[in-house]
Image: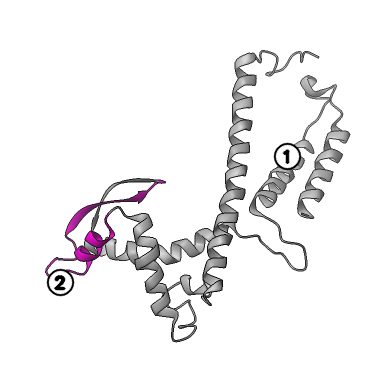
Amino acid sequence: MAIKNSLFADFEAIEIETLTKAMGLQTKLETATVKAEKGWHGFIDMLAKRGISFEYLRSPTSGLGPIDGRHVDIRNFITMNLLLPVYAENPQAILDFVTNDDVAGKAEAEFTIVHDGKMQPVTKKKQVWQAWIRDLSSNLYKKVKRHAAKKTGAKKATSDQFTLLAKDIESALKRIKKLDPEKDESIANLDIVSIQLGLETAKDHLIQK
């Protein structure tokens, strides 16, 4: 049914095509997120089989002091032997630069590293490169935590995607409650009550996931 007297009346095929592409990209994003989550869990499992707590990666002292005598050594090993080879094209060159006492802290150097999601040349000062290396483990910890399932009280684990979608639906419900079919002719034929009930059901379902 055509919508009359509305901003939506002139929708053409190009808008439908754009929406279709957007939905397709969202599906790819959700699929990639699920795969990434499985990948990070695999990494955690790999550490666990070797008796390594994932909390070792949180910070140099884990915020509470070393967990045990192996904490700092293991964190350094993971940084130097696992993370640097992945994040840098020539990790040894970076290490040589940041450990050279003859190089001033503000001296700059260019190295090819993973930046903005791809391997590319980046120029930083020595002090910044030292911080970059130090933060590799901490950043990995935060990244894995973002992909890990969230728990609220005694409820079942809720993934980020479910939580975000539930919040979007909640925002939509607030907007729907402000609609007034008597003042807006373009929505006069919409069953506002049914739409509201449908969204509330969807939100409740997501929260229970």
Q: Quadrant of residue 73?
A: bottom left
Q: Residue furthest left?
A: 102
Q: Secondary structure at mark 1?
A: helix
Q: Position of residue 97 (x, y in %)?
A: 19, 63
**Is residue 193 rendered to the left or right of residue 3?**
right
Magenta part of the protein: which range? 90-117
Q: CA distance from mark 1 to mark 2?
A: 58 Å
The residue tagged 1 is 172
Q: Which labelled disc corresponds to residue 101?
A: 2
Q: Is residue 140 above or below residue 122?
A: below
Q: Specify the quadrant that holds the C terminus.
A: bottom right
Q: Quadrant of residue 100?
A: bottom left
Looking at the image, tell me whether mark 1 or mark 2 is earlier in sequence order: 2
**Is residue 47 rendered to the left or right of residue 88?**
right
Q: Quadrant of residue 159?
A: bottom right
Q: Secondary structure at mark 2?
A: loop
Q: Residue at x 35, y 61 (%)?
A: 84
| Closer to the camera in the image, 127 or 99 | 99
Q: Position of residue 48 (x, y in %)?
A: 56, 72
**Is residue 153 rendered to the left or right of residue 114?**
right
Q: Specify the quadrant that holds the N terminus.
A: top right
Q: Is residue 56 above or below residue 176?
A: below
Name the amino acid type tagged 2: Asp
Q: Position of residue 13 (x, y in %)?
A: 64, 14
Magenta highlight on residue 93: yes
Within-10-Å neighbours for mark 2: few <14, some 14–19, many 20+: few
**Is residue 197 rendered to the left or right of residue 126?**
right
